[in-house]
Amino acid sequence: MTLSLQYPIYGPEIQCPHCRQVIPALTLTDTYLCPRHGAFEANPKNNELVHLQSGRHWRRWEGEWYRQHTHPDGIRFEIHEALDRLYTQGYRATKVIIANRYKELVSTYLERNTSWRGSSQSVPRLYGLPVEFSPDIPREPQWDVINFDLEKEPGVPKRYPYFRLFE
Ligand SMILES: [Zn+2]
């Protein structure tokens, strides 16, 4: 038996997706053990890491774990958080690109403007932003792992509502 076969697919240690602490694999199993978050199991068939306690799934791209969503609220919440972060960094988002594999999951939740010209080509929106879906996976394999991307431009600095009283 070669050394690599003694470890799960992600090697002898990984960063815990919850706390980012480096955690070890248990030899001869598919399990990683975080002292704070318990056992994570690597699935060699689909390259997913599963948190046994919560049933959450992750895939990894360039050293980062990306939670795999099974409910539209999960991905919507993640996008909302990213928009908030972008805003506090002084940007505003102009478009959301969502991984194609979520198309069915999120489609019914997207806002669609009722077209005033009766055109059937209305752009779906989320949080008021136009939504696109990612290109085919073979050309851009990161889209099999990451959940979404935001197009952004420099925005106005963050202002608080009470400033408006003095303007
Ligand atoms: Zn942890």
Image (tube, rainbow, N blue to C red):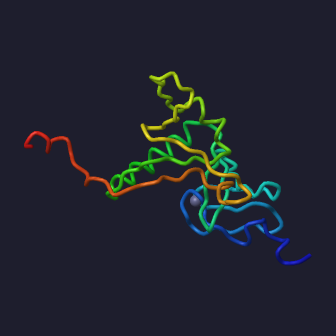
Q: Quadrant of ligand 1?
A: bottom right
Counting from the top left corner in percent of width and height, residue 70 is at 65, 40
Choose between 156 and 8: the one closer to the eye.
156
125 vs 58, left or right, is left
Q: Is residue 1 above or below residue 80?
A: below
Which residue occupies 59% across, 58% down? 17
Quarter the N terminus occupies = bottom right
124 vs 59, left or right, is left
Which residue occupies 60% across, 45% down? 133
Residue located farthest toward the left when viewing the structure as drawn: 166
Choose between 118 and 136: the one closer to the eye.
118
Counting from the top left corner in percent of width and height, residue 136 is at 70, 52
* Location of residue 80 by image quarter: top left
Which residue occupies 61% across, 68% down? 63
Residue located farthest toward the bottom when viewing the structure as drawn: 3
Choose between 76 and 8: the one closer to the eye.
76
Q: Is residue 58 above or below residue 4?
A: above
Quarter the C terminus occupies = top left
